[in-house]
Image (cartoon, grey):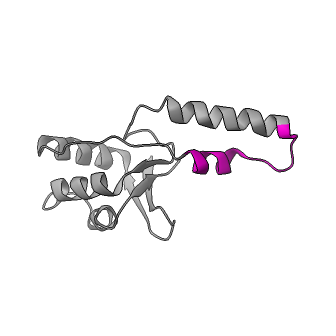
Amino acid sequence: MTYVFASLDGAKRVECEDSDWHSALESARDREWDTEGTALDFQYQLDQAWDDTVDYTVNLMLMIQAHMSVLGWNGSYTEKENQIISESDAYSLYRSLDETFAGADLLKLLAGGAVRICK
């Protein structure tokens, strides 16, 4: 399995193996990375779920589901739920991983701003 990371505009994408991402997170924490936690983007979640071909009531329920998942989000870096690593957290993670085994493409993406961990 792989993780797919993307810039928020979707223009840049990087893939890495699950084990590599988990190792990178562990390495960053060992190097005293102060995590902020990830966040779900309500509008993005809603855009992914919304279906113009179904009744408005169904879409209303999808909207409530998206809202509830955003409210109950635990800040995970390891789930693949289109969550966002903020710009400041991505940069802090980049600095913690600089000069480690982490892939150059991932480091470049993290240094460039906020990053989405894609489904």
Q: Residue at x 78, y 47 (%)?
A: 51
Asked if residue 70 lies left or right of residue 39, the reply is: right
Going by the image, does 13 lie left or right of 59?
left
Q: Quadrant of residue 112?
A: bottom left
Judging depth in this view, the residue of 2 and 61 nearest the camera is 61
- Asked if 69 appears above or below 84 in the picture, the reply is above
Which residue is found at the position 13% from the left and 41% from the top? Answer: 30
Seen from this angle, which residue lies furthest bottom? 11
Q: Quadrant of residue 109?
A: bottom left
Total numbered circles: 0
- List x then y, in percent, for residue 78: 38, 39
Residue 89 placement, left or right of 12: left
Instruction: Answer whether residue 6 is magenta in the image.
Output: no
Task: Indicate whether residue 44 is drawn in magenta.
Answer: yes
Residue in the foreground of this view, choosing between 14 and 114: 114
User: In the image, what residue occupies the spot 51% across and 65% down?
Assistant: 10
Q: Main secondary structure of the magenta part?
A: helix
Residue 65, given in percent of the width and then of the height, sits at 65, 32
| Segment tinted magenta in the rendering | 42-56
The answer to whether residue 104 is above or below residue 66 is: below
